[in-house]
Structure formats: C-alpha cells, structure tokens
Image: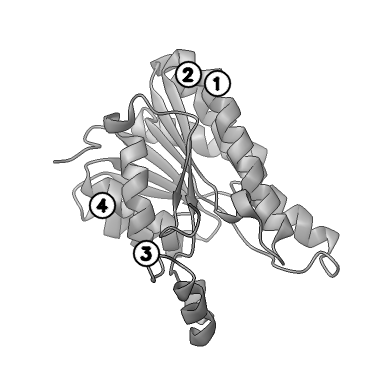
C-alpha cells in the first residue's frame, strides 16, 4: 500500500544520510520528491536519478536552507516545477561539537543558523502554499539531545530544543488551516557520520540502549512516512523519539 501516493514532498539536506533515506522511503510510498542540499548538482543529480528510478518525479536543487531568500526561491521553484507542496521535511543540520569552555562564537552561530534558522526559513516559505490548499504536513528533525541535553553539544542541543518549541508553536498557529506540524527526535542513528567513530565507543553507546543497537536511517524514515501520510491526520504538535528506548 502506497501511503503517500499523489503527494509532493520537499526535503532539505537529502543528498545523504537520514534525509536521503526519507526521500527514498517517501518515493517507495508514491510521493514525488523535491530535495535541496548545499552540494553542487553533480552530487544531487545521481541521488535524484536514484529516487526517480522508484517510479516518481524527483529533482534536486542546490540551495542553502539557512539562507532566507534562498529558501524562498527554492520553494517557489518547487511550486513552479511540481505545482504543490503536501509535505515539508526540515532535515538539514550540522554539528560543531565542543565543550562550552572552548566553543567559539562562530561554532555556536553556525549551528543555530543551519539547524534552527533553516526550519524557520523553509516553514515560513512553504506555509502559505499549504494554508491556501488547507492541507499539509510539516515534519521537523529534532534530536533526543534537544530533550535531555548532551555534554559537548550545547549548541546542537539548544538548536534541537528550539526546533521542538517551534514545532509546537506552528502546530497551534496552523491547525485551524488543517496543516499539521510534528517533530522526530532520533537517538543514536548509524549513518556516514557515525561510521568514522571508534567502534569501541559505538559499542559502549549501544549497550546503554535498551534495544542494544543503533537505529538505522530507515527507522527514522518509517516514522516520517507516518507523519506525512493521512494515517496521522489527527496528530499535530507532537515530538516522537526514535531511540531504541534511550529516553523513556
């Protein structure tokens, strides 16, 4: 059963990792995919082709989600190319981990700009199209550290906590227009970023997780499909963790 048939999804930061998994999972469920990334076309074009091979329309755009005007231009380009936006996934994000004692202003500002301001930028640009259609699902990528914090990640944790507050506020603002807004808070997900970590450290983390394993990008993507589909039509303003029981 294709849960997203006939829908158009916009996903930021989807050339790799969780974003790419969400794009592919959405496509498997019948959604047309418009995705953005800061990388050049030679890196997004193969991803678009991989997604299109699943039988949907797919296009990658070089766009910086942290840039306000660039985000507006991206959304307008999607409307021109696809005609509508049913689902927005604010996935773009970075880390610049450091103890606060050594963290620079630049490290703080960059994480806030890429992780939090991007959510403001894309949501503000896309909401008017969803309001006009009186339909839409906004899915924001938070994190378990936005709920419980993490030493050495005060900038990242603060940005993700901000996303949670933003999500709940937008759910209240747009609910009367039948536009929903929810957040996903992943825990330890095994991606290209975690592959470079010391295997012993990774194993220690896994042992602290009740399910005794790291999550996969598909674990996150499956929840995104639910939030994007009509199965969650009466769910908004919620934060759901995908963490193997790390938070209970």
Distance CA(mark 3)–CA(mark 1): 31 Å
Callout 3–callout 2 Cβ contact below 8 Å = no
Q: Height in image: 24 above or below 208?
A: above
- Kindly indicate whether the residue at mark 4 contacts the one at mark 1 (C-beta within 8 angstroms): no
Identify the residue shown where x is 56% and y is 30%: 168
Please tell me whether mark 4 sits on a helix, a strand or a loop.
Answer: helix
Label 2 with label 1: CB-CB less than 8 Å: yes
Disc 4 to disc 2: CB gap under 8 Å: no
Residue linked to disc 3: 216
Which quadrant of the view contains residue 120? top right
Give coordinates of residue 239: x percent, y percent: 49, 40
Q: Earlier in the sequence, mark 4 or mark 2?
A: 4
Count residues near mark 4 (Cα–Cα under 10 Å), then give few for <14, some for 14-19, many for 20+: some
Q: Which residue is mark 2?
A: 175
Q: Dividing the picture into quarters, in which one does residue 3 lie? A: top left
Give the answer, above or below, for where 25 lies relative to 106.
above
**How far is disc 3 from disc 2 in space, using C-alphas?**
31 Å
Q: Which mark is residue 52?
A: 4
Q: Nearer the viewer, mark 3 or mark 4?
A: 3
Q: Give the image location of residue 231, x and y in percent.
A: 27, 32
Mark in front: 1 vs 4: 1
Q: Is residue 9 left or right of residue 76?
A: left
Asked which secondary structure carries label 1, the reply is: helix
Earlier residue among tags 1 and 4: 4
* First of labels 3, 4 by sequence position: 4
């Amino acid at each position: 059963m294709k849960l997203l048939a006939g829908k158009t999804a916009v996903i930021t930061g989807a050339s790799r990792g969780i974003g790419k998994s969400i794009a592919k999972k959405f496509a498997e469920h019948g959604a047309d995919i418009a995705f953005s990334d800061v990388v050049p076309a030679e890196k997004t074009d193969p991803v678009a082709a991989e997604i299109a091979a699943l039988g949907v329309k797919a296009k990658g755009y070089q766009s910086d989600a942290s840039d306000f005007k660039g985000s507006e231009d991206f959304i307008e380009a999607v409307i021109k190319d696809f005609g509508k936006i049913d689902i927005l996934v604010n996935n773009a994000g970075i880390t610049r981990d450091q103890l606060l004692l050594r963290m620079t202003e630049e490290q703080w500002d960059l994480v806030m700009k890429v992780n939090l301001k991007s959510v403001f930028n894309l949501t503000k640009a896309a909401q008017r199209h969803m309001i006009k259609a009186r339909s839409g699902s906004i899915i924001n990528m938070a994190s378990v550290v936005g709920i419980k914090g993490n030493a050495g990640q005060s900038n990242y944790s603060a940005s993700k906590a901000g996303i949670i507050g933003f999500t709940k506020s937008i759910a209240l603002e747009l609910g009367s227009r039948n536009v929903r807004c929810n957040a996903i808070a992943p825990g330890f997900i095994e991606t290209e970023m975690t592959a470079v970590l010391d295997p012993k450290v990774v194993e220690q983390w896994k042992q602290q997780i009740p399910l005794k394993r790291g999550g996969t990008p598909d674990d996150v993507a499956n929840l995104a499909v639910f939030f994007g589909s009509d199965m969650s039509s009466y769910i908004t303003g919620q934060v759901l963790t995908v963490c193997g029981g790390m938070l209970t």
